[in-house]
Amino acid sequence: MQKNTKTLFLIFSLVLFLLGMLTFWYSHSYSTIRPADRDFSLDREALVTRVVMHDQQKDEKVALIKDERGQWMLSSMQPANDLAVRELISVMERMSVRQPVSISNREKVEQMLAQKGVKVDVYVQAYRIHIGNLKMWPYQRRYQVFWVGEDTPDGESTYMRKAGSDMAFKVHHPGRESGVSYLFEPGIRAWLDPVIIDLDWKEIERVSVEVYDEPGESFHLKLEGEGGFGFYAWDQPDQPLTFDVDTAKVMRYISSFKDIHYERLLDKQARERKKEFIFEQPFMKITVQSVYSHETGFTAYARRVTDEQKQVTGAIDRDPNRFYIKMGEGEFALAQYYVFNRILRRLSFFEK
């Protein structure tokens, strides 16, 4: 009897050992969870140069691009909100998988990602030759591609899936009690910087001003290095304009393109009603070309005053304090004259 008990114990132990080995072998050889499938974070040593977010269902897409000065720009070469981009990259560096999506919920999550997911492409600076400190022939390399969905029902994680993977995960940012889906916003409005122009005069190559009500007041002002400049005809950019120029005014003007910012973007209700309080024809358009080959600018529209304001201002039908600007991406914003007045100049302003 004792001999039979030992035999059964040995057989039972052998079976457990074999089951353990089989489980180990299967999990390492045939598991669908590959290490690459669950790696969503960015290497903190990597230099991120571009982040593209695309919502195919809404047809919204935004590209955040770091220029040679290290400033984040939108694809239209309009400055992006630097703090918002830094927060996004900081979160991507620390994202961690909490757990895979359960088998019972997997199909539902996949449908959600396909219908509402945002595709995120991350590019980094790489070098074709990188040996120790030797770095040669830089180029942009796509580092990560993943889909971001909604936050989990408990609000503590976000559904994500790597491109090329067939398994979604619950991803979180350690230390945060909420999901991170709100950061992956493909709409332009979320990334616009209120500062639309911020250039030192040495960084400006050309300023083009179109005056709609008086075309003869339009001009191109080109900086020619070593403090030189020249005015050119609006309709003939290579045709110099000859007049008695007040050089001091020109120098003050080209030194005024610092911290040009709007007050606020129009909210949904204001966008729907903008025809009621924005004059149809703009009064001026300003475009600035930098030495970095970036072009930015805006179109300015006068703001109608309300009937109540007319009783105070008399016959004036234009707001003397605020106006509207339309930026490169088509967004309208409310702006203040005291910020912009120094650059809203016509050609005759520069005559002695």
Image: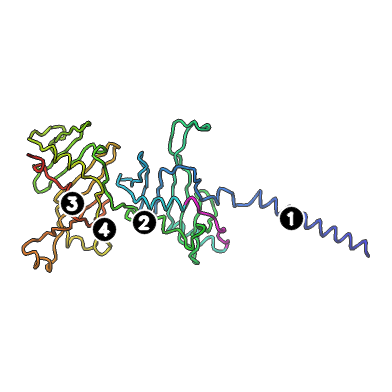
Residue at image location 13% in from the left, 41% down from the top = 249
The 10 Å Cα crowd at callout 4, few under 14, some 14 to 19, many 20 or more, is few
| Mark in front: 3 vs 2 | 3
Q: Earlier in the sequence, mark 4 or mark 3?
A: 4
Q: Position of residue 200 (x, y in %)?
A: 26, 41
Q: Whole-Å distance between the Cαs marked 4 and 1?
A: 63 Å
| Residue type at numbered disc 2 | Lys
In the structure shown, which secondary structural element does the residue marked by tag 3 occupy? Answer: strand
The 10 Å Cα crowd at callout 3, few under 14, some 14 to 19, many 20 or more, is many
- Comparing 198 with 248, the one in front is 248
Residue 264: numbered disc: 4
| Mark in front: 2 vs 1 | 1
Answer whether residue 336 is magenta in the image. Answer: no
Q: Position of residue 189 (x, y in %)?
A: 32, 55
- Comparing 269 with 83, the one in front is 83
Q: Point out the stretch of residues depicted in magenta.
A: 92-103
| Residue type at numbered disc 3 | Ala
Tag 2 and tag 4, C-beta contact below 8 Å: no
Answer whether residue 99 is magenta in the image. Answer: yes
| Residue type at numbered disc 4 | Arg
Q: Earlier in the sequence, mark 1 or mark 3?
A: 1
Q: Earlier in the sequence, mark 2 or mark 1?
A: 1
In the structure shown, which secondary structural element does the residue marked by tag 4 occupy? Answer: strand
| Mark in front: 2 vs 4 | 4
Q: Earlier in the sequence, mark 4 or mark 1?
A: 1
Tag 1 and tag 3, C-beta contact below 8 Å: no
Q: Whole-Å distance between the Cαs marked 2 and 1?
A: 49 Å
